Amino acid sequence: MRLLLQQRPEGREAPRFVQLQLQPDLLGGWTLLRETGQIGGRSTLRKDLFADQASAIAALEAARDAQLKRGFQLMFAQGADAPR
């Protein structure tokens, strides 16, 4: 699963983005990757590990909802189970 959220730029600044990816790992767990930054600039990557898919999806949805409250807009969603 992959979600891309983007915030409208203020003034002449580049827009900020948040990308959330949910991936299975080799040991049966799940990894939530959170990449944040400005488009065309540096970004930060954070990894969170989860034992099962349900808790990983709950964390992805919570992260998505937090960013939507901050003014980000959902630009792209990929994956059969992608929450909208």
Image: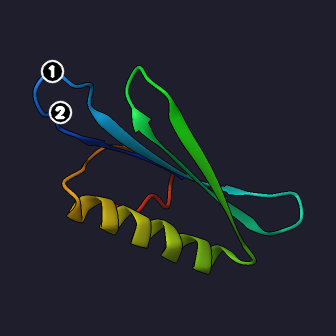
**Callout 2: SS:** loop
Above or below, 2 against 66 in this view is above
Provide residue 19's location: percent of width, then percent of height: 46, 45
21 sits to left or right of 18: right
The answer to whether mark 1 and mark 2 are in CB contact below 8 A is yes
Residue 42 in the image: x percent, y percent? 50, 28
The C terminus, quarter of image: bottom left
User: Would you say 14 lies left or right of 41 here?
Assistant: left
| Crowdedness near tag 1: few (<14), some (14–19) or many (≥20) residues, C-alpha within 10 Å | few
Q: Which residue is mark 2?
A: 9
CA separation, marks 1 and 2? 7 Å
Q: Residues within 10 Å of mark 2 (few under 14, many from 20)?
A: few
Specify the amino acid type for callout 1. Answer: Arg
The dot on residue 68 is none
Residue closest to the eye, 16 or 68: 16
Residue 78 appears in the figure: no
What type is the residue that disc 2 sits on? Pro
Is residue 19 visible to us here? yes
Specify the farthest residue to the left.
11
Q: From this view, report whether residue 50 is shown above or below residue 2.
A: below
- 66 over 21 or under it: above or below: below
Residue at x-position 15% and y-position 21%: 12
Nearer mark to the viewer, of 1 and 2: 1
Q: Position of residue 50 (x, y in %)?
A: 70, 73
Q: How many marks?
A: 2
Expressed as whole percent of the image width and height from the top left, the position of residue 10 reads 13, 34
Q: Is residue 49 left or right of residue 59?
A: right
Which residue is at the far right?
27
Identity of the residue drawn at 71% across and 65% down: 30
Numbered badge on residue 12: 1
